[in-house]
Amino acid sequence: MRLAAFLSLAAAVVAVNACVSNDDPFEQWHGPKAGDVRGPCPFLNTFANHGFLPRSGKYITHKDLADGLLNAVNFDANISAFLFDFAVSTNPEPNSTWFSLDHLSRHNVLEHDASLSRVDAFHGHADIFNQEAFDETRSHWGDIVDVQSGVSAIVARMKTCKSTNPQYSISQLGEAFILGETAAFISILGDFQTITVDKRRVEYLFQNERLPTTLGWKRPETQFTTDILIGNLQTVAVEYRKRLNSTVLGKRGEGYAERLMHGRARVL
């Protein structure tokens, strides 16, 4: 009897632990099902796949985004407000208070040519991961992705897309987002102080649209603030300007992202 009682108790404990684990969004992942939508941003797609954002990818409110980014990667309210203000502008419905991930694919609003993991709009759909484009990107990274190799990948993608896309263009906003995206993914998945990250983590997220917890990544304990993002973006921008020459779109974006952040983000 005692053995039976012990086994029953052990089974109950296992069941409870399984339920706790199953409720953990970092462990709960599934890709989009029929009717769901995704967009050109690997991170936002990932957050929807984990349930930090609505899994449908639709009708994302400011609260959805702020809560999701806080819970997933410890973003502060300023960054969430900044991102939401721009994301909601892609919704074709006037005066909307929500957006869906597929709205972000509208070309030359936030979506831009020279993506690290998508083809240009001239060649296909920005909401679909493209292995060939991403292979070019990661060929410029070492085992550790840092500012120098991150910028090398940006410039390489720009040159390739400029030579293969007769309608190639990048707006000042698009250029600022390219630099910000690289600063962000290195900082979030790696060390925001040294601005370095294990290449495997980045590859895992981009290719699977899943947080790389199996590779040892955990939600950052230090909150990712506007000041951290701007500081790291400036470091990326300095390296970017070093790589440019007179034939490349570029210096228009100098300082633009910082002005953008200070002008659009608000403390909630």
Image (cartoon, rainbow, N blue to C red):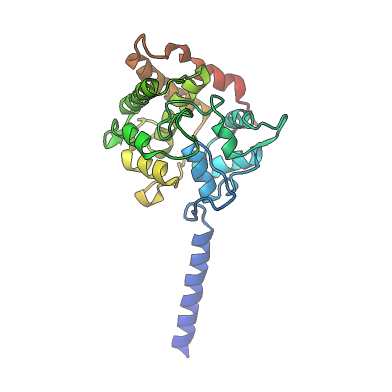
| Residue found farthest to the right | 95
- Seen in the image, is 93 located left or right of residue 41? right
| Residue found farthest to the top | 246
Give the total of numbered labels: 0
- Image height of 102 relative to 237, above or below: below
Residue at 47% x, 91% y is 1
- Image height of 263 relative to 192, above or below: above
Q: Nearer the viewer, residue 228 or 94?
A: 94
Residue at 58% x, 30% y is 78
Residue at 50% x, 20% y is 257
Coordinates of residue 44 in the picture (x, y in percent): 52, 40
Q: Nearer the viewer, residue 130 or 230?
A: 130
Coordinates of residue 132 in the picture (x, y in percent): 35, 36
- Seen in the image, is 79 located left or right of residue 181? right
| Residue found farthest to the left | 142
Within the image, what quadrant is residue 133 found in? Answer: top left
Q: Nearer the viewer, residue 110 or 3?
A: 110
Residue at 42% x, 14% y is 249
Which quarter of the rendering shows the C terminus? top right
Within the image, what quadrant is residue 88 found in? Answer: top right
Q: Nearer the viewer, residue 157 or 184?
A: 157
Coordinates of residue 182 in the picture (x, y in percent): 41, 29
Coordinates of residue 140 in the picture (x, y in percent): 29, 30
